[in-house]
DNA sequence: ACCTGAACACCGTTCAAGT
DNA sequence: ACCTGAACACCGTTCAAGT
């Protein structure tokens, strides 16, 4: 929390008079550029791939230059997570009053957005609530409220849905990475079927209808939360 | 996966003939001792507090000695997480047929066990399924199956509950740490109530009836999943 | 206002060696 | 079978300084 620019920082010289930089096309550092490059690194190599040094390298800057625009690595991660959660809103529906379809769309998009950047799920237990997360929560609240959920029940409803979506997303991402391991684990499970007969038989670890399971559970939750 | 001891390794000399160690009471290294000490470190200082060097120090051993008993740091974390999830089973109930109470107990205990060691929640998107996790899944499966859930629906039911519990636990832990931040965030939210009127008004970020919300959502889920 | 290199205090792990 | 120190290839961040 120093006297650094915390805004968007878009008030930057368009074509600065050759700032003595090496590459002529290299634009100056900025919060946005740092976050965008962090995303590239994260998408390419996961959480371990993001290093302040690697980040600076790719930006053609010294490591410490980053710290002018950004508090620390935590800050970069917070910004990266939030940038994944940009949301353009629900599509215009035929029946404009179908709140349930809207909610399902919002939550499926939330999950899908994170799964497109699997590293984001392991970042999740995170105190910082960025703009995009708050926007999504706001929209969800408004929709549920408009659908008739009483004010007294609203928070419980929001948090239940949030919990469900986050859990589903995290789980999905963590098991997706290691499909082979999963198969191996299931096999081991069935062989020594002594201790785990039920989940061995049901092939729990091989089930891969994640999307279906997600929608099903979400449906049950909405059944319970919804007014009528 | 080298030729290291992966069992419990309890076949150890009771009172070895003074193994030339410094402290005379210092027992020899072992997987169990390593994990136990890792837990101490994690409980005391969180995830950042666990370092192979610190761990070795506290065990009165050289850093590299750990690597005889353990593959690497990941391994230590996997073991630490699983050791938090030890479960002694549901209590003997009055009505032995009340499957629903049993399930609620199991899942509340799961959540509580992790919240007792908050670092465990940020470890969660984890591929390694330890004994205790598998035991819990097995017990949950058996109970639901016994309650009449069809085999075809069993996996979806398990994963829905798992997702919900994991999401709730992770969320709870992450917001618990930073109560002040939460209050500050809510205040900021309400002041610039422009963009987030609904969650500003509902005081979403100040709501702290986590346990109630958890039970409520769980109830809805069970309503939907249960046969009758 | 913005960027920098050197330096500090750490990491996890490989390796070759000891008993 | 079990333990070890030295060394390697890294980390994030402070600081004092440059323009």
Image (cartoon, coloured by chain):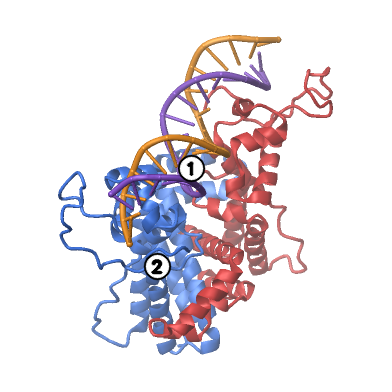
Chain colours: A blue, B red, C orange, D purple
Q: Which chain carries label 1?
A: A
Counting from the top left corner in percent of width and height, residue A78 is at: 43, 60
Indicate the secondary structure of the residue bearing disc 1.
Answer: helix
Counting from the top left corner in percent of width and height, residue B109 is at: 67, 61
The quadrant of the rendering that contains the C terminus of chain A is: bottom left
- Label for residue A186? 1
- Tell me: residue B122, above or below residue A4: above
Left or right: residue B1 versus residue A215 is: right
- Tell me: residue A23, above or below residue A11: above
Q: In the image, which is nearer the foreground, mark 1 or mark 2?
A: 2
- The foreground one among A202 and A13 is A13
Q: Quadrant of residue B21?
A: top right
Counting from the top left corner in percent of width and height, residue A128 is at: 48, 65
- The foreground one among B153 and B117 is B117
- The foreground one among B201 and B110 is B201
| Residue A3 in sight | yes
- Label for residue A215? 2
- The foreground one among D16 and B197 is D16
| Residue A112 in sight | no
Tag 2: Cα neighbours inside 10 Å, few (<14), some, or many (≥20)?
Answer: some
Counting from the top left corner in percent of width and height, residue A108 is at: 36, 67
Residue at point 48% right, 64% down? A1
Q: Which chain carries label 2?
A: A
Residue at point 43% right, 83% down? B192
What is the distance, in whole Å, between disc 1 and disc 2 at their CAs?
24 Å
């Amino acid at each position: 929390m120093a006297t650094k620019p915390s805004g968007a920082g878009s008030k930057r010289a368009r074509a600065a008079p050759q700032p003595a930089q090496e590459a002529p096309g290299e634009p100056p550092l900025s919060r946005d550029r740092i976050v965008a490059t962090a995303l590239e690194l994260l998408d390419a190599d996961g959480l371990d791939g993001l290093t302040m040094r690697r980040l600076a390298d790719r930006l053609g800057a010294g490591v410490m230059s980053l710290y002018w625009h950004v508090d620390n690595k935590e800050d970069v991660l917070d910004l990266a997570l939030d940038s994944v959660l940009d949301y353009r809103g629900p599509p215009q529906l035929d029946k404009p009053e179908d709140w349930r379809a809207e909610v399902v769309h919002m939550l499926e998009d939330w999950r899908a957005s994170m799964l497109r950047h699997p590293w984001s799920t392991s970042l999740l237990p995170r105190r910082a609530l960025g703009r995009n997360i708050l926007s999504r929560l706001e929209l969800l609240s408004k929709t549920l409220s408009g659908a008739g959920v009483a004010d007294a029940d609203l928070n419980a409803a929001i948090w239940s849905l949030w919990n469900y979506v986050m859990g589903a997303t995290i789980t999905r991402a963590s098991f997706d990475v290691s499909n082979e391991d999963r198969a191996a684990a299931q096999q081991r499970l069935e062989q020594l079927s002594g201790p785990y007969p039920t989940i061995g038989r049901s092939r729990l670890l091989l089930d891969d209808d994640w999307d279906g399971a997600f929608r099903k559970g979400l449906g049950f939750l909405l059944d319970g939360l919804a007014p009528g």
